[in-house]
């Protein structure tokens, strides 16, 4: 169990994340949802910093592969950099199994990021995040740079890879359709606070707060392939 309490953030004298506590069970799938500016990403970053300071293995996948990959460096360079950052011997990780599960085994590591499709780039970033079998992987709007079909396929592959493993997942998104099909629990944020948390189905069927009702009211999410 990963437990934190009192997480908060202040920027320019303004509280953007009020004191927050979380308990995350091994293998748990949590969706952190809310409107833009509600504090989702801030909570994610503060949580990552806190857990890493304790020595926990926490991986982070950002919105776009552009934020993680240097366009002037080869994909092999990025992979080796990830191994070095984790203190691993180069080539120590069996990347073939991981690449196969994420369907990027055919990618040419000699190429630079722009030589791969956007979907393959994002799956490569996810693969780097999974190198050390982390205790927790935090995905911050991981599909925002992808079209819905590619996003759905990417999340399907990640779900399959994590099945049966103890790596917990927090999916940060404003896309309720993406979260509804991927997580067992939803946490709804508004103005820097978690205002509601419950099993996914309960919030979708009986939202209690204004923020949750606002998200659920946009029923178009039901039709999305994510």
Image (spheres, grey):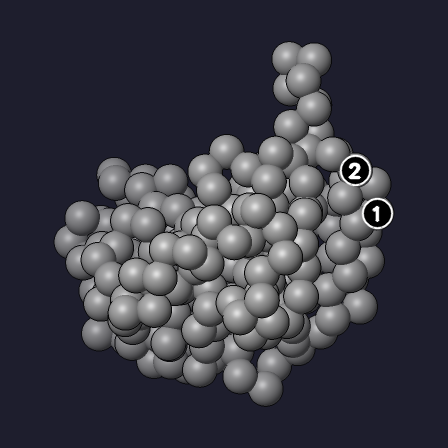
Earlier residue among tags 2 and 1: 1
Identify the residue shown where x is 46% and y is 53%: 215
Q: Closer to the camera, 179 or 44?
A: 179
Instruction: Give the quadrant of residue 105.
Output: bottom left
**Looking at the rendering, which quadrant does residue 197 occupy?**
bottom right
Circle 2 Cα neighbour tier, 10 Å, few/some/many (<14 / 14–19 / ≥20): some
Residue drawn where x is 70% and y is 24% of the image: 15
Whether residue 44 can be seen here: no
**Labelled disc at residue 19:** 2
Residue 68 sits in quarter = top left
Label 2–label 1 contact, CB within 8 A: yes
Residue 65 falls left or right of residue 50: left
Q: Helix, strand or loop at disc 1? A: strand
Residue 95 or residue 171, whichever sits in front? 171
- From what the image shows, is residue 21 above or below residue 99? above
Total marks drawn? 2
**Where in the figure is residue 50, as x and y percent of width and height?**
75, 44
Give the labeled residue for mark 1. Answer: 5
Left or right relative to 33: residue 185 = right
Given the current orientation, which residue lies at the most extreme bottom position? 164
């Amino acid at each position: 169990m990963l437990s934190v309490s009192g997480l908060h953030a202040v920027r320019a004298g303004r509280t953007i994340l009020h004191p927050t506590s979380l308990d995350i069970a091994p293998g748990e799938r949590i969706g952190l949802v809310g409107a833009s500016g509600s504090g989702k990403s801030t909570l994610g970053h503060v949580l990552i910093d806190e857990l890493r300071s304790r020595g926990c293995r926490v991986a982070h996948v950002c919105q776009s592969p552009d934020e993680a990959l240097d366009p002037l460096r080869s994909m092999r360079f990025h992979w080796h950099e990830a191994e070095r950052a984790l203190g691993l011997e180069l080539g120590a990780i069996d990347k073939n199994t991981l690449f196969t599960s994420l369907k990027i085994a055919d990618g040419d590591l000699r190429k630079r990021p722009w030589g791969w499709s956007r979907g393959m780039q994002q799956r490569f970033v996810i693969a780097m995040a999974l190198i050390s079998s982390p205790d927790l992987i935090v995905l911050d709007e991981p599909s925002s740079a992808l079209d819905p079909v590619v996003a759905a396929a990417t999340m399907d592959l990640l779900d399959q890879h994590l099945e049966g493993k103890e790596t917990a997942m927090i999916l940060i998104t404003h896309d309720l359709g993406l979260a509804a099909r991927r997580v067992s629990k939803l946490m709804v944020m508004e103005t820097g606070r978690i205002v509601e948390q419950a099993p996914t189905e309960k919030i979708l069927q009986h939202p209690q707060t204004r923020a949750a009702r606002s998200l659920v009211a946009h029923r178009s999410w039901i039709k999305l392939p994510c």
